[in-house]
Amino acid sequence: MNSEVPQPPPDPADFDALYRGDFDALSRNRQPPGTEQLPGFRFDRVPWDIGEAQPVVRALEADGQISDEVLDIGCGPGENAIFLADRGYRVCGLDAAPAAIDIARGRARQRGLDERVEFAVADATDLSDYADRFTTVVDSALYHCFPEEQRLRYVTSLHGACRPAARLHLVCFSDRVPDDFPGPFRISEADVRDTLTEAGWDIHRLERSTYTTAMTRADMENQDSAPLAAAAAGLDHDDRGRLLAPAWLLTAERR
Ligand SMILES: C[S@@+](CC[C@H](N)C(=O)[O-])C[C@H]1O[C@@H](n2cnc3c(N)ncnc32)[C@H](O)[C@@H]1O
């Protein structure tokens, strides 16, 4: 939330706590001691759980960009995976947070799709149990959770889980997300381009896009923080008032 202060990477245990209802888990003020302590961001829901697939994932599917078998990596509550299963694809959703996997399985069951989508707990930086399996990977807002020193390991791990010529569609926060907006690491074009290329991915598309959040401008104004409200005011929103975080959409092919 403050560009002057290096942000610590999110702790995987915090994601699990968040999914179990501790909504402050990721946004507690964790700046290093001795630095200016900013007011924490308080929210009453999972800030990326929009209860449906991301519009960008729907658009990729409509454009014929998905093929069996699909990996939804860092699937969270499973909405992208469930959407793709409903569209007829074989899908595997993986997340490091056991609570996310419980939620995803519950939603798949409720929608009668539990036979068509598999969810499991896994660390995306070690996918050795899934070697050479997938032909499409969807990363909807996981890459930007990793600090710089872990990103290469992560996309190398994805490479190992894919078959040759598999496609990776990756959506991550870009460096146009305002500093005061809560959230993960901001990713530069050079970062994502160089990291993917080094790990054996040929980039076919790298363009500006948006990631739909579960937060509205009103939610941000209710935080009683002028910087947060100003950051939100600078973002576009959809017709339901949900803030759209500036993002990269990258499509790459496994060499
Ligand atoms: C910002 S959320 C995005 C969730 C979902 N893809 C979506 O768009 O709604 C990032 C997800 O990545 C998961 N995650 C974080 N680190 C991970 C890791 N090392 N391996 C697998 N999942 C991880 C978190 O638990 C969280 O569910």
Image (cartoon, rainbow, N blue to C red):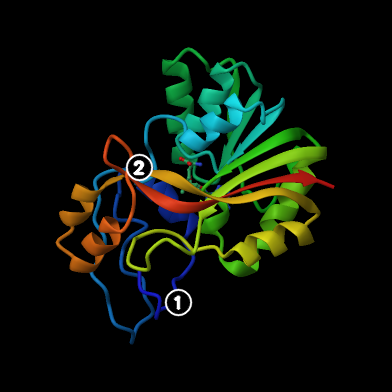
What's the residue type where badge 2 is placed? Arg
Q: Nearer the viewer, residue 6 or 34?
A: 6
Q: Quadrant of residue 234?
A: bottom left
- Note whether residue 97 is visible: yes
Q: Where's residue 91, x and y in %?
A: 63, 26
Judge whether 148 appears above or below 73 on screen.
Answer: below
User: Which of the labelled discs sits on residue 68, or is there none?
Assistant: none
As measured in the structure, the alpha-carbon distance from the residue carrying label 2 to the one carrying label 1 is 27 Å
What's the residue type where badge 1 is placed? Pro
Residue beneath the point at 38% across and 79% down: 32
Residue beneath the point at 60% across and 68% down: 148
Q: Quadrant of residue 162?
A: top right
Q: Determine whether the residue tagged by mark 2 lies in a helix, strand or loop.
A: loop
- Note whether residue 131 is visible: no
Q: Determine whether the residue tagged by mark 1 lies in a helix, strand or loop.
A: loop
Q: Where's residue 225, x and y in %?
A: 18, 65
Q: Viewer-nearest of labels 2 and 1?
A: 1
Instruction: Say few, some or many: other residues with alpha carbon within 10 Å of mark 2 (under 14 / 14 to 19 / 20 or more).
Output: some
Residue beneath the point at 64% across and 66% down: 190
Left or right side of 40 for 200: right
Left or right side of 64 for 212: left
The residue that mark 2 highlights is 20
The residue that mark 1 highlights is 6
